[in-house]
Image: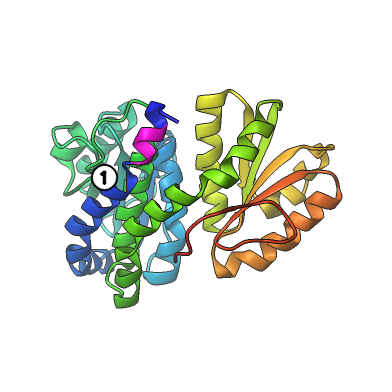
C-alpha cells in the first residue's frame, strides 16, 4: 500500500516517541494540577472527541476525577455549572474551531481554567489556554490517525503517567506499534477483500475498545463510504443485533486481558446467528479469524 493514510499510519511510532519524550517527564507536574480540581471536562469533535472517550477509562482507573466527555458544540448546556474548581481540556487538531474559540472566551470570562491539546502552536487555542500540550503530529492530509494517537497518549499521560508501572508500559508503545504494523497485514487483507462487496460494516468492542470502535467507524466512513457503525458489543446486542443477516461483516476489538474472554463469547454468538466475525486481539483464536496485534497494556 502506498496511500497517504497508510504512510501516515506508519509515522505513528515516531509520533508516539515524541509525545512520550516530552510529556512523560512532566507527568507528576500535571498530576499535581489535576489534584487541585474537583471536576474535569474533556471536549472535542470527531477524532479528538473519540480520543477523549478512549482516555476516559484511564482517568477512571488512575485519577481522582471521573471526566465528563462533551462534544464541543454542546458546551453551552454545561457552561452555567462550570466554576473555578473545574478544569476543561479542549482537544483540537487545528486549535481554531469555532467552538474552541467561542467557548474558550466564555470560560475565560467566567474565570475558569482550560488547557489546550492542539497541533498548532500559533493557534487561538494555544494562545489562550493555561497549559498547552502540542501533538507533534506534523501535517496530516488523510484521516486524523496521528492526531488521534497523539491526543490519546497525552490524555493517558495526564491521567496515569505518574504511575511507575504505567510509565514502563508506555515506554514500550512505540516499539509495539511498529511491531503491530509489521505483522497485521496477513489478517487485514482477507477482511479488506470482504468489505469490497458489502454496504454495511460494524466495529464492536467493550470498554476502551468500544471507544476505539467509534474512531474506526469514523475513518471507515471517511475513506471507504461504507456505512460503518462503531459501538459497544453490549449496546449492539440490546437492539441493533436485529440487523444481523448472513455474512454481515463485524470486526470485534478484543485486545486486553480484561476484554478477551467476554469478547470471544460475544463473537461466537454473533457467528452462530450468521455474522462474519473477525477478531482484533493480542493473541490467536482457534474459533474465529483473527487480526493479531502486538501484546501490550
On the image, the x and y values in percent for residue 148 come to 38, 43
Q: Residue furthest bottom?
A: 164
Of residues 39 and 46, the one drawn nearer to the viewer in this rendering: 46
The residue tagged 1 is: 117
Q: Secondary structure at mark 1?
A: strand
Position above or below: 33 against 109: below
On the image, the x and y values in percent for residue 98 come to 31, 26
Q: Is residue 16 left or right of residue 144?
A: left
At x 25%, y 44%, the residue is 135
Visible residue check, residue 55? yes
Decide whether the magenta segment is chiefly helix, strand or loop.
helix
Position above or below: 282 against 228: below
Q: Which residues are magenta?
A: 6-10
Magenta includes 5? no
Q: Quadrant of residue 230?
A: top right
Q: Is residue 216 left or right of residue 84?
A: right
At x 13%, y 37%, the residue is 127
Amino acid at each position: 500500500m502506498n496511500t497517504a493514510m497508510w504512510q501516515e499510519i506508519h509515522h505513528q511510532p515516531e509520533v508516539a516517541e515524541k509525545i512520550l519524550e516530552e510529556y512523560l517527564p512532566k507527568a507528576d507536574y500535571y498530576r499535581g494540577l489535576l489534584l487541585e480540581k474537583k471536576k474535569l471536562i474533556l471536549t472535542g469533535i470527531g477524532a479528538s472527541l473519540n480520543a477523549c472517550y478512549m482516555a476516559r477509562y484511564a482517568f477512571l482507573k488512575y485519577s481522582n476525577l471521573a471526566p465528563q466527555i462533551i462534544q464541543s458544540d454542546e458546551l453551552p448546556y454545561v457552561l452555567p455549572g462550570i466554576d473555578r474548581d473545574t478544569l476543561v481540556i479542549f482537544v483540537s487538531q487545528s486549535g481554531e474551531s469555532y467552538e474552541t474559540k467561542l467557548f474558550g472566551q466564555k470560560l475565560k470570562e467566567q474565570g475558569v481554567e482550560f488547557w489546550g491539546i492542539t497541533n498548532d502552536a500559533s493557534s487561538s487555542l494555544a494562545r489562550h489556554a493555561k497549559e498547552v500540550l502540542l501533538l507533534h503530529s506534523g501535517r496530516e492530509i488523510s484521516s486524523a490517525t496521528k492526531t488521534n494517537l497523539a491526543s490519546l497518549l497525552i490524555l493517558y499521560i495526564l491521567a496515569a503517567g505518574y504511575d511507575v508501572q504505567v510509565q514502563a508500559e508506555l515506554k514500550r508503545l512505540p516499539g509495539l506499534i511498529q511491531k503491530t504494523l509489521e505483522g497485521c497485514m496477513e489478517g487485514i487483507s482477507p477482511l479488506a477483500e470482504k468489505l469490497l462487496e458489502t454496504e454495511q460494516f460494524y466495529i464492536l468492542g467493550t470498554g476502551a475498545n468500544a471507544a476505539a470502535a467509534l474512531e474506526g467507524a469514523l475513518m471507515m466512513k471517511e475513506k471507504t463510504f461504507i456505512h460503518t457503525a462503531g459501538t459497544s458489543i453490549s449496546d449492539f446486542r440490546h437492539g441493533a443485533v436485529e440487523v444481523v443477516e448472513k455474512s454481515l461483516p463485524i470486526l470485534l476489538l478484543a485486545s486486553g486481558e480484561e476484554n478477551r474472554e467476554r469478547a470471544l463469547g460475544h463473537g461466537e454468538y454473533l457467528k452462530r446467528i450468521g455474522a462474519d466475525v473477525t477478531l482484533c486481539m493480542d493473541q490467536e483464536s482457534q474459533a474465529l479469524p483473527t487480526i493479531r496485534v502486538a501484546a501490550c497494556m
